[in-house]
Image: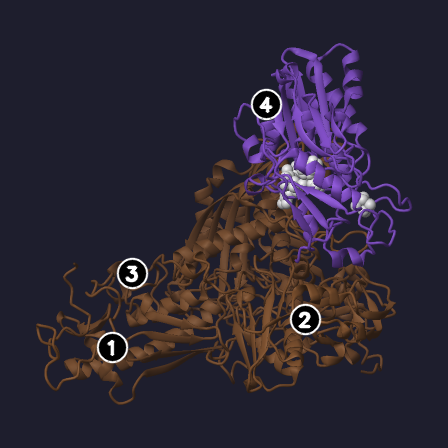
Amino acid sequence: MSGGYRQQPGGSGQTTRKDGKRVAGKQSFPPPGSGGSRPHMSPRDLDFIPESVGGKEEQPAGSHIHDRARTGTTVGKEIPLVDSNAKVTGQAWYGDDVRLPNEIIGKILRSPHHYARIKSIDTSRVEALPGVLAVATGEDSPHRFGVLPVTKDEHAMAVEKVRHVGDLVACVAAVDEATALEALNLFDIEWEVLEPVFDPKKGLEDSDEPIHWRGKYHLSKTNVQKRVFQEFGDRSLVDKPHAESHGKWSMAGVHHGFTEPHAVVAHWGPNGRLQLYTPQQVPHYTHRALSTVLDVPMHQINVIRTFVGGGFGGKSDPFPHEMCAAILARKAGRPVRITFDREEVYWINRGRHPSHIEVKMTADEEARISGFDIDALIDGGGFASFGHVTSYYNGVLATAPYELGSFHYTGARVWTNKPASGAMRGHGAVNTRCAVEVGLDEMAETMQVDPIDLRLANLLPPHSRTISGFRITSNGMREALEKVREGSNWDEKFRQLPLGKGIGIGCGFFISGSGLPIHWDPNRFPHATVHIQVDMDGGVTVHTGAADIGQGSTTAVAQVVSEVLALPIEMVHVRSHESDTSPVDLGSYSSRVTFMNANAAIRAALEIREQLLNAAWDILGYHPDNLVLNDRRIYYKHDPAIGVSYLKALHKAQEDKGSLIASGAYRSPPMGGVHKGAAAGLAPAYSFSAYVAEVDVDVETGMIRCTDVWAAHDCGKALNPMAVKGQIIGSCHMGLGQVLSEKMVYGRTGHLQNANLLDYKIPSVHEMPHVEPIIIESCDPEGPFGAKEAGEGPLLPILPAVVNAVYDAIGIRLRDLPLTPDVVFKGIEKTLKDSKIDDPLDLPSPRLTHSSLQPTLVARAQEHKLRDKARQRTEDTSPYVNGVLFGFDPTIPLEDQVEGWRTATEPDPEQLAELGLAGRAWLKKEQREMGGEN
Amino acid sequence: MLMPPFVLHNPTTVEEACSIAGSLMEKGEDFDWVAGGTDLLPNYKWHLNPKPHVISLARIEGVNTLSLHEIGCMARLADLTVENGIHPLIVEAASKVASSLIRRNATLGGNLCLDTRCFWYNQGEDWRRSIDWCHKADCGTGADCRVIPNQNTLCVATYQGDIAPTLMVLDADVHLIGPSGLRTMPLQEFYQLDGMKKNVLEKGEFLLKITISEASAARTGSYQKLRVRDTWDFPEAGVAASWISGDATSLKIATTALESIPRCHPDEVAAVLETDWDGMNSVKALAAAVRKSVKPVNNTSLPPRYRKSMVRVLTKRAVEKMLE
Ligand SMILES: Cc1cc2nc3c(=O)[nH]c(=O)nc-3n(C[C@H](O)[C@H](O)[C@H](O)COP(=O)(O)OP(=O)(O)OC[C@H]3O[C@@H](n4cnc5c(N)ncnc54)[C@H](O)[C@@H]3O)c2cc1C
Ligand code: SF4
């Protein structure tokens, strides 16, 4: 036994005699709580208490406002996720595990046409089938919904038109699956088949029958759902470039490939309230949409988030099948369950947009990046989903981590007759990031400099502002680059490996929570709220709406509460499944949960802590400033023997009010510019990452094998290093899929040809490289204990790292993703032909001889390193805005210093002729300009 | 996904299996054989030509023999992937089939009698409805082939089994049994050019075993498989070669996953052997000739042009080993 102070209550011998008999007249109350599984207090774990508050945990990036709340209990320690036992023992209840008494089975009738008008639906034969208990069609659900309030373009089932093969037409509930399936064959539908659009380029043109109609905001008669123009900085800098890169990319759509297909159970309770069980990333959005579609106030709906078998953005829309289940259950008066086949999962899609991306970039004679010019045409499929945001993200998330002379972006998202694209891990940032990072590699090649040094000499420092006005706080980009360079032995390998072997670099930058809470003004409601309740037994119940989708948000919340209160994590119970009991949380997307929710949880926990310390003050007579909170005991700083157990303090605190209750909220500080779209990409903090990948390319077959990855990610502070490493490795896997083998294949007839997990090729364990996760801790000033996101950003760098490594291996730039062997082979064949080589084994390997720019870059990077260090540790708090590298004064608005410094969100008329592919959307006029009607 | 209902028969002897088949045929009731079910059952779940009766070969005694010279139809692929005294070329091919999990159920008979595959066909029912079906699973509509249209007589779905080409270059014989008795033929003659008919099996007949002669068992060989992922994926092209050590003229080559049937390439080999064997040059000539002779179509994951190009590389890599 550790011999510490006993923390178990009871055992005082007051109410029982030695022989076990009761003392006359005294009732024996058993102790109300055990206070954890270990009876004795463990000593303080100084290794996990920051230096700034007397511990031994080093803080190279400086101290943090939450340091005083650290108790060395769980933060920074590798602990298994709190729900892992449930998962490994098969007790986690996913969507399809829910079984309610009397439930019946719902099935959805799906469109066999790409695009068609429904002239009539006759359901009489369906209704006549014995065993059918409810039938519903679009007529039962006239209200529109959608994840973004600005683009509600979905119905529970098609109203008037179907927009892709697999679109929902009607649904039926029957006593069993076989009957429901049989019933699907009995709908009599009269169709008027319309001319479909598959090619997003065609979507830019006028059509007879646009897929949706936006009324007076519709662009001419095109299928453009959203267009974006953004131009910042001094465009004259790009005029006489010293080096440039220009690449046109075509990137296939990819799907999240989560394990659990969508499933939902809807049940109207005896009081007419709806209970809806669904594996959702955004239960609150579903809650809102259900209310609209069903015409029922939100308080009459309880959304129960089941365990989520993976989401990655694919379960972050309110879905039509959720509405269908509720409609059928209401009609049938019995619970209805709908579970998808894999094919249906692909049809509801919301995967990454198929994209045509063009990136031009230039550098000046000092190898400063004078301009990024990005054009992104993204294929939205049949519905808007998150597309409004995606259209911005494809541009604006490229405005860091590098300092830019100017930035120009045109983006357009078009509707096509395919399953809808949406948000997927790394939302909107992944494809452009890949194009940009490969462009940098190419510019480094022309300037004959090392691509890592090129990056190191052009980074924005900590506490700065991007050209688009984003506020950068902590920034571990430099350290990440240095670590992967060292770990991979880059300097001995780059441009020196034999043919077929290559090494490449790629970086990433991602939001840690979106600054705008979509549904409300951040000044009116906070982003996240967490309630904590502590009752007599000492257990701590945390109520949060944060949706754990496997990323570990429940664990993160449990950890921070256990840390602040110095309680073993098994004493903290997180309740997050039901909207009835959870405070509103927007959901698990845009990597917001740890940052916002854990911050709210810390606030609530600090309030509880205060109450406990005040109670201990009452008992011990020492002011809380002199008290230490450690493992179920509060004691006098200078003598642990003078103290009180946690339970005693708790019971004291409860004397007047019963159980302790506290609520904490997180709200982001005001930030960002005022231009149109300024809120897109705005986040309270950003993550940074750098990966080096090594590949083997079989030059005869075009097969690529990624063998090793050094993956450095700046997550601010790893609350749980094991979880962070898991996210890094998982992100590598997912990104590798997109770059090497995954694609949604649309065949010559426009059908999705591979709506199954055999033909949609997610890398298997055999394709996984050795991944070396490297955690960078830049200690974000506003993050919970310094933490930022680690769930999405780590995906970004793997794509360009692999593409660049392939170039290093075979000297060929490939810009069609994924790099399936046939694509690579085609590239090799073409090169052989162009350079008149017969045998691919004779291909030359690229080599590098440094130019005189190289030492300049190395020197500048060295200088910047000192600059960054001072800024990171707040030794230097002077303002820094993008532009300082180009000689501008950060204290004077750039517009006042530079003639022609632009902040434009619409093209000038003279620019119209030069815009890229997506930019062409700006040639079209809005209906209201044409006097069009709604 | 709901499996359509069927009656499962579980004979325990070859005779009983034949008699069940015979009596179903008499009654005019359709049926399928099932062995490991790793191909048939996924197809049934997708409602691809399911039958009202299924006769399982799993409980029949004595049809899982395993030796250098004879392998029974119910021999599990998992047992073919370890050194069980089986020819190493078969071990090599079997180890590359599907995944270790699937190989625990999969059998040799099922592998040889594998249904042909096509991305217009291996899809769920809703999906196939959206293309208005196809010739191979026309659901009573008389639909055309979607790969080569305007010819609703032939199906060009691809045979994507891995083991057949290796058995072909080992000159294996197949033994078929049915209500009308036993017959034996070289495996090379077993397959029939049509993605629906697939092979010579008559209704009621099943593949009992394969045998390999003493002389053939002495051959060495190599099997090269083209696939995107090293597990799961069906071959996108496969080339098997075998030879008698030190004797280039003994070379045999067979390909799979390129057409509706796996097949040997005796003519291409003979043409190259006509001139004197010239090491690597002959290998390259042979590789080019085999490539030229195959005609893949667009119905698997990778484009046919690429698959065809790869036949050259695979052939080269398979035969190269002979020079070692
Ligand atoms: C995900 C996945 C990946 C796969 N990858 C591969 C691969 O890489 N390479 C490969 O070759 N195969 C692959 N397969 C297909 C299949 O698993 C194997 O070919 C396996 O060997 C089939 O054997 P089985 O016993 O399971 O066949 P079953 O499914 O039982 O039967 C297959 C067919 O053969 C018929 N049949 C079975 N036995 C006999 C017999 N003795 N006589 C007559 N007809 C018979 C059945 O009626 C049926 O039509 C894959 C399958 C899946 C699901
Ligand atoms: S080849 Fe033609 S007939 Fe055969 S399965 Fe494919 S589309 Fe159908």
- Direction from residue B250 to residue A734 in the image, left or right: left
Does residue A828 appear in this view? Answer: yes
The chain whose colour is purple is B
Q: CA distance from mark 3 to mark 2?
A: 57 Å
- Whether discs 3 and 2 lie on one chain: the answer is yes
Q: Earlier in the sequence, mark 3 or mark 2?
A: 3
Residue to which mark 3 is pinned: A48
Tag 4 and tag 3, C-beta contact below 8 Å: no
In percent of width and height, residue A88 lies at: 44, 56
Residue type at tag 1: Pro
Tag 2 and tag 1, C-beta contact below 8 Å: no
Q: CA distance from mark 1 to mark 3?
A: 31 Å
For disc 2, the chain is A
- SS for tag 4? loop
Chain A, colour shown? brown
Residue to which mark 4 is pinned: B87
- SS for tag 3? helix
For disc 1, the chain is A
